[in-house]
Structures are given as structure tokens and as C-alpha cells.
Image (cartoon, coloured by chain):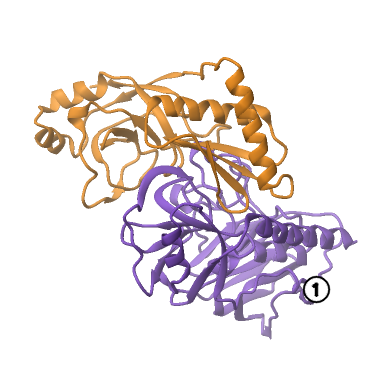
Amino acid sequence: MKFEPLGDSAITVFLGDGISRELSADVQQLADALRSESIAGVIEVVPAYASVAAYYDPLGIGYDELMDSVRALRTRMSRTPASIPSERRIRIPVRYDGEDLTEVADRTGHTRDEVIGLHADREYHVYVVGFVPGFAYLGELDPSLVLPRRSVPRKRVPAGAVAIAEAQTGIYPYSTPGGWHLIGTTIQKMFDPSATEPALLRVGDRVIFEPVG
Amino acid sequence: MIVVERAPPYLTVQDVGRPGYRASGVPHSGAMDQWSLALANLLVANQRSAAALEWAIGAGALRFERDAVIALTGAEVEGAIDNAPIRTHCAISVHAGQVLTIHRLVARRFLYVGVHGGVDCPPILGSRSTYLPAAFGGIDGRRLIAGDRLEVGTLAGNSEGTSETSVGVVAPDYDSRVVRAIARSGGSEFLMSFLDTTFTVSAASDRTGYRLEGDHVLEADAASITSEPVCAGAIQLTPSGQPIVLMADSPTIGGYCILGTVITCDLPIVAQSMPGRKLRFVSVAVGAAQDELRRRERFLSGERQRRP
């Protein structure tokens, strides 16, 4: 475990490096524990692939004090059996009509139907929510579908676009610039600013794509 | 009610921001220059959380349909209320029917128009801040246009203004070319070279981030990393070797190497820097940055309590 200040009002706790399910589960457990601990001064907790950030008010707690609290929490966590992080299963209907579907099929040596089959026949794990509100980074993609990002990002990707890049897949919650390959669209609303929890997906969720006609 | 008679190219509703939803990918957002927002609210006897107008780039005019007490902070401007020249950084009484015209922004980037009672619009996720990329907050999540009508909140009590002279001790030094940042521990050579570089604020700068152009290009071998949480002020090194300072609408996570993070007290200096301005970074300890932030916050809450 390594600590780094993220400015004067946040601390990042690194639990490892790279991307793996084990690390992601570890990150999620620490994030959950930090949230339920309700440390005075801590405003919010954000899990990423290998790290967790706690954003805090320096009028309520100092950097060293918070670091000590996280250390103590981690020690207590190691003494008690790890709780299984909550796993919600969320199904997302997809019409596989993306602009890049044919190109993806060509470049990966598959037919369009094979790409659809490989993308849909899998349970994905939510590693991170970010980039833009409600955007979830899902992994891992079937290795035969792995492609680098598009060399020239699109200025506008339509809302609901289901896309892939490298070993990940995701859904654009609303129209933004984007560099991933578009393979489909969903009518599922991914982000609702009027909801208490505005993003449909949270870190640790399981996601299954269901092809619709 | 405030009516936008002529909209400047950029005019939005902003407040202290939208904490608490980063895990859903929602940026903190809020005013680019939080000090000037806080000062505007202080001058018109508002709560810290009141929303104000953030104004940039060009000329425009607002008509006040009711008597109001307003304060202009941040950018230096040339403007008038009807035909009388205006002063910034003090409370101004405006009468029903009068028009505030801003002819031009003379120095700095963002002007804040605070109004006693605050600009009222439905809070989204606990904030009135406008987040343009996802089009929520403020008025329909967009820049204000001519004809927009803004509600003003009602507050019981005194709206008497205060003078700016007393804030000098804790105000950011907007003329400073030196910005303090808390450095990351890794990559000391990187960091030395970063701290040795004078940067120019690029025209490619917006509420999400300010691009900086260095007088020499930094080694960017390790520029891409496993994405980690970021915040406003974080200085990311892009693969081009040029850094970006993330600003108010910063994404919640980023995949570029973080060199350090501008301290909260100095972020307004960066925010108010026009393209072409030269900036240099110096390293400061977390404790020192937090001490200064505490001083500033205690000053603001002390001033508020002193008022009737």
C-alpha cells in the first residue's frame, strides 16, 4: 500500500499496479470500508483500477491523520475475513448496429455475427466509472476482439453507443467525443442526473449484453 | 428577476460545485475561480453555497427587474450601470429597471456577478453549477442566451456590502507567475525538469483543463499509466510531453502521469490566466498548503460572522 497526496484535499491509496480482477476486488473492498467507516472530514471515495482516492476537507482532517486512519482500517480489514463485495447483475439490451461493426469484423478476422456472439456471450466486470458521468469501463473483452483505439477519435459519438477498445467495452451515456469502435446501441439510460445514484453502473457490478433485433 | 439583455459569448450559472458524485463519474465542477466566487458571495452577504454568474470573453448586458445588491469580482472590467461607471470588488445597489453593461474584460479571464439572495435555479445533484459537456445544472445545462430570465433567491436580513481592502491578506496573488503545487513522490528527474520549465498557457484551454506549452518538451516515456482518480489542479503529462492542468470540470479519473497538483489557494491564479500568460510551478508541502487553505477559509467564515 502506497500513499500519494492528490493536492491538498485528496489522498490516493495505491494497492498495486495494472489491471486485474483481484486488484479490482481489493480496491472495491477498501473503498467500501472507507465509506462505511465515515471518517470525519472525508467527503467521498472513488475507486479506480489499482487505487482509491479519498477526497476530504482539510478543515476537518489533515493528510497525516487520514493516512493513519486508512492504515489502521487496512490492518483491521486484514484481521477479519474479507466480505464479499456486492455483485449486482445488470442486463443491457444492445442492437448491434454500430458504425464500426463491419470494420471490427474485418480487422479481427471474424464475421459480424461472430463479433456479436463474442461480445454478448460474456459477463463483464465494472472496473471504473469515470471519463464522463456514467461511463463504465467493462472488462475483459474476448482476446480476439482486442483492437487499439481509433487513430482519429470521433468528434461526436451518439448517446447509447456500445463500443470497444483494447480489452475493454463501454457505453457512451450521452453524446461526447470518443475514440472507441462503435459496435452497437442501447436504449438503456446509463446516466440520470435526477437520480440519487445517477450512474446506472457502479464499480464491481456484473454486466451482460443482450442482443435485440 | 435578472434578464439577459445581451449575452456575452460565455455566461453560465456556477457555485461551489457538486461534491459527492465522483463515484458516478460526475465532475466536481463549480466556479473556475472559487476565491472570486466566495468573495462575491461575501460582499453581498450570501451563504458560501449561493450561485453566481460566471462571465467570460466578451461584452454583454443584464437588466435587473427588481432592486438588487450585486458585486463583481474576478476579472477587471470596463462597464456601467445605466451610464455610471462601475467598480468591482464592492457591493453595489442596483435599482429595478437598471442595466448592467460589461463593455470588455480588461484583465483576467472570468468575471463573477454575485447577487444578494443568489441566482436561483433547480439544483441538480446538490448544485446549481452548469456542467456543459453533459448539459445539466444551471439553466438547462447550457450557456445563457439573450432573453433568459434568472430568478434571484430571497434572503432575510441585511445585504450591506463590505469593502475589499480587508481581504488582501488571504487573497490569491493574481499577478504572480509562480504557482505552488504538491509534487508526486515518483520520478524526481521528471519533476526537476518540470519545475525548471516556464510554461505558456495555451489557447486550447477550457473549463475541463488548461494546456500548457513548455519552453522545452518534457520526457514523456511514462506518460500513460493505469487510470487513477484525479481532481481540479492535477497536472497531467500527456504523451506529447506537454502538461495539462485539470480545471473545475476535470474528469474524475485520468490515464496520464500526474506530476503534482496545484494547491487550492493558487488554482484561481491558473484559472484567471489568459492564453499566452507565462507560469512556473514550485513545490510546496501538503501541510503548508492546508495551513494556508485553513487560514483562507477561517477568514471567509470569520468575515461572514462579523456581519449583522
Q: Report whether A36 appears left or right of B154.
A: left
Q: Position of residue B230 (x, y in %)?
A: 49, 48
Task: Classify the position of the N terminus of chain B by image quarter.
Answer: bottom right
Name the image quarter holding residue A98. top left
**Is residue A62 depicted above or below A38 in this figure?**
below
At a point 56% along the width and 39% down the height, the residue shown is B21
The three-letter code of the residue at mark 1 reads Ser
Q: Report whether B256 appears left or right of B29.
A: left
Name the image quarter holding residue B271. bottom right
Chain of residue at mark 1: B
Q: What residue would you read off at disc 1?
A: B166
Q: Position of residue A61 (x, y in %)?
A: 72, 44
Q: Residue furthest front?
A: B189
Task: Classify the position of the C terminus of chain B by image quarter.
Answer: bottom right
The residue lying toward the viewer, choosing from A55 and A19, is: A19
Name the image quarter holding residue B268. bottom right
Task: Tell me the purple chain.
Answer: B
Total numbered badges shown on the rendered structure:
1
At a point 39% along the width and 25% down the height, the residue shown is A21
Q: Position of residue A109 (x, y in %)?
A: 9, 31
**Is residue A208 depicted above or below B229 in this figure?**
above
Looking at the rendered structure, the secondary structure element under dot 1 is: helix
The residue lying toward the viewer, choosing from A9 and A110, is: A9
Question: What's the colour of chain A in the image?
Answer: orange
Q: Position of residue B7 (x, y in %)?
A: 52, 68
At a point 55% along the width and 50% down the height, the residue shown is A6
**Is residue A112 depicted above or below A44 in this figure?**
above
At a point 70% along the width and 35% down the height, the residue shown is A39
The residue lying toward the viewer, choosing from B159 and B238, is: B238
Q: Is residue B180 visible?
A: yes
Label 1: few (<14), some (14–19) or many (≥20) C-alpha neighbours in 10 Å: few
